């Protein structure tokens, strides 16, 4: 079931790294597109944050099965892309995501733990 993912976010570009950040943006789109075509992920969606003054400038959601996401996070090319992101942009961050049916399961666990602490 494709209910796992990654939330990859970034802030402002470091001064002097703008051209590298642009190359990274273009390359990452191609990279995730190829993963999608190969069936190694089930979702890839980039977002830009248009407001000013906040540290968040953009993010992307990458989705797949837990196995696909697990394999992705140990892939050398993916690791290098995250390293380049960290070198180009402030506040770069990768967080695991759960969505779909996995959210229901997690909330059931949480509810159980809430009641256990009461």
Image (cartoon, rainbow, N blue to C red):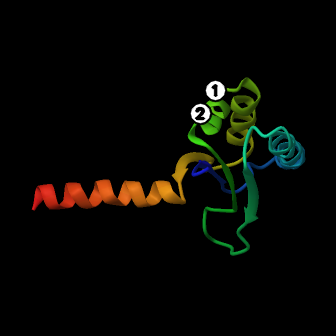
The residue lying furthest to the left in this view is 118
Relative placement, left or right, of 69 versus 20 is: left
Write down the residue under mark 2: 70
The residue lying furthest to the front in this view is 1
Q: Is residue 68 above or below residue 59?
A: above
Helix, strand or loop status at disc 2:
helix
In percent of width and height, residue 57 lies at: 69, 62
Residue at 21% from the left image edge and 54% from the top image edge: 113
* Local crowd size for mark 2, using a 10 Å CA cut-off: few (<14), some (14–19), many (≥20): few
* Local crowd size for mark 1, using a 10 Å CA cut-off: few (<14), some (14–19), many (≥20): few
The quarter in which the C terminus is drawn is: bottom left
In percent of width and height, residue 51 lies at: 69, 75
Q: Distance between the Cα atoms at labels 2 and 1? A: 7 Å
Q: Nearer the viewer, residue 92 or 106?
A: 106
Disc 2 + disc 1, Cβ < 8 Å = yes
Helix, strand or loop status at disc 1:
loop
In percent of width and height, residue 92 lies at: 63, 47
Relative placement, left or right, of 97 versus 73 is: left
Q: Nearer the viewer, residue 114 or 88?
A: 114
Residue 74: mark: 1
Mark whose residue sits in front, 2 or 1: 2
Quadrant position of residue 85: top right
Relative placement, left or right, of 102 versus 68 is: left
Quadrant position of residue 28: top right
Residue at 50% from the left image edge and 58% from the top image edge: 101
């Amino acid at each position: 079931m494709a209910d796992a993912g990654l939330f990859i976010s970034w802030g402002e570009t470091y001064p002097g790294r703008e051209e590298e950040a642009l190359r990274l943006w273009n390359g990452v789109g191609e990279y995730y597109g190829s993963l999608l075509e190969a069936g190694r992920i089930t979702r890839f969606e980039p977002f830009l944050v248009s407001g000013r003054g906040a540290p968040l400038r953009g993010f992307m959601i990458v989705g797949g099965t837990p196995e696909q996401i697990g394999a992705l996070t140990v892939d050398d090319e993916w690791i290098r892309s995250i390293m380049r992101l960290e070198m180009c942009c402030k506040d770069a961050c990768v967080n695991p995501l759960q969505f779909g049916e996995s959210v229901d399961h997690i909330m059931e666990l949480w509810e159980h733990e809430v009641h256990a602490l009461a």
